[in-house]
Amino acid sequence: MTLTFLLLINLALAQSGCFLYSDSPFYCSDLSIEEAETECFFYDDCVLEESFFLEESCNDKQLFTECKVVFCKDTCTEQLLSQCEAGPVPAGEEELWCVKGGCCQFEDYCQYKTSEGLCEIEATNNDFQDFSFTESPEEECLESCLQPQVIETDIIENISNINENITKIEDDSSNKVFFWLFLLMFAIIVIMIIHHFYHFQYFKKNFWNKVKHLFTKKKEIIKTKEELKWYSPNFSNPLLRKEIKSMKQKREHKIKQRNREDYLAAVGLIPKKITKDEFSKLRQVVSAHQRKNKYHPEPKKEYFHNLEQVVEKIKEREENFRERLTHPKKFKEKKDVDELIARLRKIAK
């Protein structure tokens, strides 16, 4: 009984694999071949050979690093590494990043944040990579943030007094500049009027055509994309239809949940997620390419290359044989010349 049970488990595992299509709600999940085919069917750009790896489990974190569950910085929850935009929280700093509040500072920004993770998100949203976060109560943080503002107000008052003195000195020169600018604008307007009347006849001919062309409505061609009817043996089975229906409901539920999170992040009720940078996208492309080369290698071309060399040698022999039949004298003369050169070399020795 135990042997048969183990054999059944091995057969079930042999027909399953890791599904890695990022837009699917079943991303980083172990699915059977039938489930992977039906899930990949819902997406136009889903390629089963690139998104499904047979006889491999997503629990293998060394092979599928993107399926590793980490504590994420931007959400302070456990997520997949590929879906964690800001990266994982360093080990042992979960309270500092997600629980303990402090003073967040970068450039002119100074405000109290409830966690270091929110401070990093605020800095990245304002296109700043460097920031400082010091653990402190909210009152101390606000007091420290107000101190540089007082200094700045004094500097602004001094600068305004200097500017007033400069403006008094430059009033006379600005009046002269304004007079010359007025003359220049007047000359440009006169030149434009002359140019307009010079080309009035040409303008008169094409004016109404241009007006008609602007106000004529272009016929909008709406291309109706007909939905293709797909016929699959999976839909003829009632059990598979129930599974497909449940997978559809799960997928729609997860899509609605994702849209709801995006809306709440846009309103400001939850922290915004950081968009993926180019390096993370490049890392995913490289890992997918490595897995594709491992599980779907290109065929070797050594045998075809050797066959081409044999064909080329046969063609050369056929050409030499034809030339001997068509021009026997040339080959005889060439042979005599080669023998003469060989004799001369022997004499020279």
Image: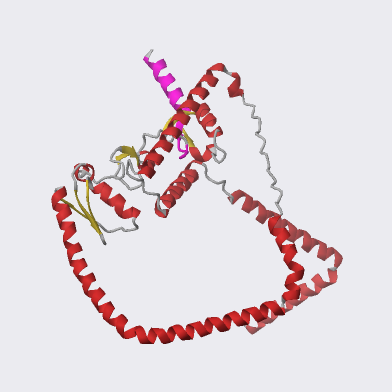
Q: Is-magenta flag for residue 46?
A: no
Q: Using the rendered image of the protein, determine whether residue 55 is visible from the camera's viewpoint.
A: no
Q: Is residue 39 above or below residue 179?
A: above
Span highlighted in magenta in the image = 2-23
Which residue shows up at 26% across the image and 45% down it? 89
Q: Using the rendered image of the protein, determine whether residue 310 is visible from the camera's viewpoint.
A: yes
**Residue 42 locus on image (x, y percent):** 55, 33
Which residue shows up at 45% across the image and 23% down it? 12
Which residue shows up at 31% across the image and 58% down it? 128
Q: Is-magenta flag for residue 4?
A: yes
- Circle count: 0
**Residue 177 locus on image (x, y percent):** 43, 85
Q: Residue furthest top?
A: 1
Looking at the picture, the colour scheme in use is: secondary structure
Q: Residue furthest right?
A: 326
Q: Is residue 55 above or below residue 202?
A: above
